[in-house]
Image (cartoon, grey):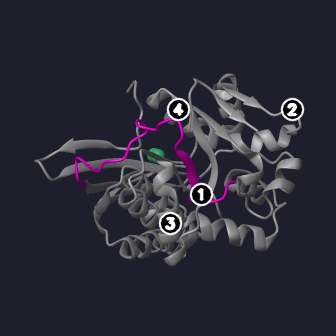
Amino acid sequence: MDSPDDAAVWRLDEARALVVTTDFFTPVVDDPYDYGAIAAANSLSDVYAMGGEPFLALNVAAFPPKLPNWVLSDILRGSADKAIEAGVVIAGGHTIQDEEPKYGLMVLGFVHPDKMLSKRGAHPGDALVLSKPLGFGTTTTALKKGEAEEAHIREAIDWMTRLNRDASRLAVRHGAHAATDVTGFSLLGHGWEMAEASGVGLRLRFADIPFLSGARHYAEEWHFPGGSMDNRLYFGKHITFAEELEEHEQMLLFDAQTSGGLLLAVPPENLPALLEDAARIEQPLWVIGEVVEGDSIEVI
Ligand code: CO
Ligand code: CO
C-alpha cells in the first residue's frame, strides 16, 4: 500500500500477468444509461493505466429498492455496451440494497510483465502527456446544482464514457516510462503519486492543459465537489503555482475527476512518433509539461 498503483498485478508466467481492479461510485449524471457507461469506462481504465487489456468483469451494485426497474436495467445496459466496445465479458456480479445507488465493475485483465506501465519510472526530460481534458468534477457539480448548460453536460459525458484503451495501447507501443489515470485525486494528486513513486518532480504549463468548454466558468462560480477541496488540502504542500494563476485556475488542477484521461511520461525521443500515431487514429493527446529533477510539482 505504500506505493499506490492503479491495479494489483499478479504474475502467472513469463508472458502473462493478471491485472485486478475494482471501482464503484454514486451517480455523476442524470441519465442512468450514461451513468452505467461512465462507471464501466472508469473501472476498465485502471487496467488500461497499467498497460493491460481487460477481458472479464463483474458488476458491483447497490440499488434503492424503490428505484424503478427500467433505471436499473438502463445502468446495466450502459455498462454492458461499454464492455462490449472494450471486448470485455461481464459474467455476473453482486447487488445489495442501499439508500443511494452505487455502481461499478470489478475487472480482470492481462498484461505482459515486461510491458506493464506503473507510476514508477518517469525520468527527468520525459514529456507529460494527457489524453482527456479536465473539468469533469466542476461540470458535474454545476449539473447537480442545476447550473450547468446542456451542451457542457453532453461534452463531459462524451469524454467520461470514452475508453482509455487506445491511449493505453499507444503508450505501450511507444515505450512510455510511467502511466496513471486521472481520477478522484485530480491531475495534481495523481501527478504527485507518479512524481513520488518515480523520485522526480513535474513541471506543468497551465496554458497547455486542456479543459472542458464550461469548466473555467463553473470553476469561477466555485462549483467544486468536496473531493476537490480535499485534494487541495492533501496535495497542496507539494505544489507551487505561478503567481499570476488565480485561485479558481489552481483549483481546476485539484478538481476530482471521474473516468479521466491517462497521464503518461514519455521519453522525448519517442514523442513525435507517439503524437503522429495518435493523430492517425484520432486519439487526442496534449503535451502539458515535463518531468524534471526534484521533489515537487511546479505549475507555470
Ligand atoms: Co486509477
Ligand atoms: Co481506481
* Residue 36 numbered mark, or none: 3
Q: CA distance from mark 2 to mark 1?
A: 36 Å
x and y percentages locating residue 256 in the rendered image = 64, 45
- Disc 2: which residue: 243
Label 1 CA crowd tier, 10 Å (few <14, some 14–19, many 20+): some
* Left or right, residue 130 beside residue 207: left
- The residue depicted at 36 percent of the width and 75 percent of the height is 84
Q: Is residue 60 visible?
A: no
- Disc 4: which residue: 195
Instruction: Give the mark nearer the N terminus: 4 vs 1.
Output: 1
Q: Amino acid at mark 4?
A: Ala
Q: Amino acid at mark 1?
A: Pro
Quarter of the C terminus within the rendering: top right
Question: Mark 1 falls on what kind of element?
Answer: loop
Q: CA distance from mark 2 to mark 4?
A: 22 Å
Q: Classify residue 294 by image quadrant.
A: top right
What segment carries the magenta color?
A: 111-134
Q: Nearer the viewer, mark 4 or mark 3?
A: 4
Q: Amino acid at mark 2?
A: Glu
Q: Is residue 3 visible?
A: yes
Instruction: Give the mark nearer the N terminus: 2 vs 1.
Output: 1
Instruction: Give the mark nearer the N terminus: 1 vs 3.
Output: 1
Q: CA distance from mark 4 to mark 1?
A: 31 Å
Instruction: Give the mark nearer the N terminus: 3 vs 2.
Output: 3
Instruction: Give the mark nearer the N terminus: 2 vs 4.
Output: 4
- Disc 1: which residue: 27
